[in-house]
Image: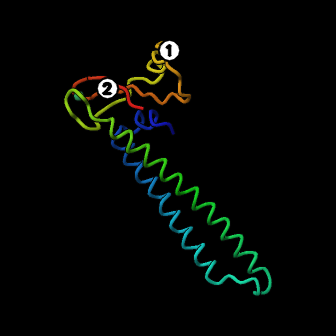
């Protein structure tokens, strides 16, 4: 879900909270994969009979891949949440997080008309302070 859709649907504070919870679930997944890989390494031996070495090796590779993916996802989600949170304080009245999305497309069009390079996925979000009505953009 795009940040603009999430903020519009849940409000900024709940969206931010959900981003933090979900990103930390990825961190826990990464930690569990790390434990599984270590457990597989501990008893690994090519001298073991049957499918055990093959299965352990498969689990180690899959666990490593899943753990790396989860760690990357954790970092991306946390960075997005923190970066957005840094821009969510109203510059007029100083209220934190009391904002609503005022439109993504309009701001993206204005940006293109100014001749600046468009950055793809419409990440420029227009927001409005719920307390004083001041408008600004967050990326
Ligand atoms: Zn304000």
Judged left or right of residue 136, residue 61 is right
Please report the residue visible at 71 percent of the width from the left and 84 percent of the height from the top. 45
Contact check, label 2 and label 1, Cβ < 8 Å = no
Q: Residue furthest top?
A: 113
Residue 136: x percent and y percent? 33, 25
Judged left or right of residue 121, residue 20 is left
Type of colouring: rainbow
Residue 135: x percent and y percent? 31, 23
1 shown above or below 135:
below
Identify the residue position indicated by label 1 in the image.
Answer: 115
Q: Residue furthest right?
A: 50
Split into 4 quadrants, where in the image is the C terminus? Answer: top left
Location of residue 36 by image quarter: bottom right
Label 1: element kind: loop
Question: 10 Å neighbourhood of mark 1: few (<14), some, or many (≥20)?
Answer: few
Judged left or right of residue 76, residue 137 is left
Task: Pick whichever of labels 2 and 1 is earlier in the sequence.
Answer: 1
Residue 127: x percent and y percent? 35, 27
Label 2: element kind: strand
- Ligand 1 located in image quadrant: top left
- Total labels: the figure holds 2
Please report the residue visible at 21 percent of the width from the left and 33 percent of the height from the top. 94
60 shown above or below 82:
below
Please report the residue visible at 46 percent of the width from the left and 13 percent of the height from the top. 114
76 shown above or below 5:
below
Judged left or right of residue 30, residue 10 is left
Residue 25: x percent and y percent? 47, 58
Identify the residue position indicated by label 2 in the image.
Answer: 128
């Amino acid at each position: 879900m795009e940040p603009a859709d999430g903020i519009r649907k849940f409000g900024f504070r709940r969206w931010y909270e959900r981003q933090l919870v979900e990103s930390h679930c990825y961190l826990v997944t990464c930690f569990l994969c790390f434990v599984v890989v270590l457990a597989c390494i501990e008893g690994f031996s090519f001298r073991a009979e049957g499918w055990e070495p093959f299965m352990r090796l498969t689990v180690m590779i899959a666990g490593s891949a899943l753990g790396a993916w989860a760690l990357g996802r954790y970092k991306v989600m946390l960075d997005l949440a923190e970066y957005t949170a840094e821009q969510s304080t109203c510059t007029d009245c100083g209220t934190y997080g009391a904002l609503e999305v005022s439109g993504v497309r309009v701001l993206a069009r204005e940006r293109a008309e100014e001749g600046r390079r468009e950055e793809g996925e419409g990440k420029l979000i227009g927001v409005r302070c719920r307390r004083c009505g001041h408008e600004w953009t967050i990326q």
